[in-house]
Image (cartoon, helix red, strand yellow):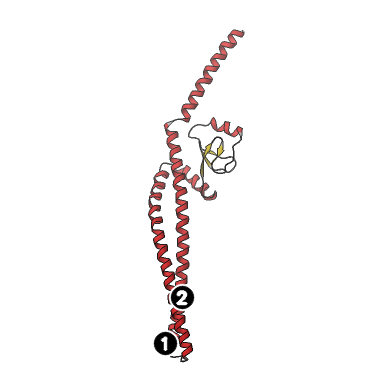
Amino acid sequence: MATEALEQLLVVQDHDTRATQLRTRRRNLPERTEATEVAAALAEADARWAVLDAERHRLDRDQTRLDDEVASLRAKLDHADKAMYSGAVTNPRELQALQEEGASHTRHIGLLEDQELEIMVEREPVDEEIAPVEAERVAAASEVPEALLAEYEGLRESMGGVGAARLEHGTCGGCHMKLSAVEQDRIKGLPADATIHCEDCGRLLVR
């Protein structure tokens, strides 16, 4: 009986070995590698886009502020010119003060317009770089199933711009929390195309 049990144990071992080999093959399927690469490309494109978009918004805010300042100064300059040439002011000292005020506004406007030009020059390469990043993002997103992409977009919006992260050595690359041993074992037994989430932050995980 003992010999038969040992022989049967070898059969069990054969099945276990085969199962291990199949799981290894499943983890290394070309489709899985491609999906991982697509997810990584999408995450990289989104990260680059976020940096460029933040820079573009900063430049937009600066330009809007300068536009408002220039408009305000032009209104003051126009008011000073009207007062000076309307004939209502005849006192030489008051006229001189209006002239000096107008000259000051004109100089200030010139400085602000120079700053606006600098912002336009600074923004040009940002706009040029955004275009290919957008194209890369579109290409990467086209390879992701619609439902999965929608879930990713929702998570990205609620998770500070990061909806998917790589799972490395049992740690989520998004929140940097290590998954429990039970969860890691559960994930190892899932099919290669299974959708998994971080048990702490809820982000999509890419194995």
Give the residue number, with chain letter if any, for mark 2: 73
Q: Quadrant of the N terminus?
A: top right
Name the one closer to the observer, 199 or 51: 51
- Where residue 101 sits: x, y (%)? 47, 81
Residue 199 on image: x %, y %: 59, 40
> Secondary structure under badge 2?
helix
Decide if residue 134 is on the left or right side of residue 4: left
Query: Residue 158 placed where, x, y %?
Result: 54, 50
What number is the disc on residue 195? none
Above or below, 84 relative to 57: below
Rendered residue at 45%/72% (across/down) = 70
132 in relation to 11, above or below: below
* Residue located beneath label 1 in the image: 85
Image point (39%, 56%), residue name: 125
Vertical order, 126 against 110 (above or below): above
Q: CA distance from mark 2 to mark 1?
A: 18 Å
Q: Position of residue 81 (x, y in %)?
A: 43, 83
Q: Identify the residue shown where x is 38% and y is 58%.
A: 124
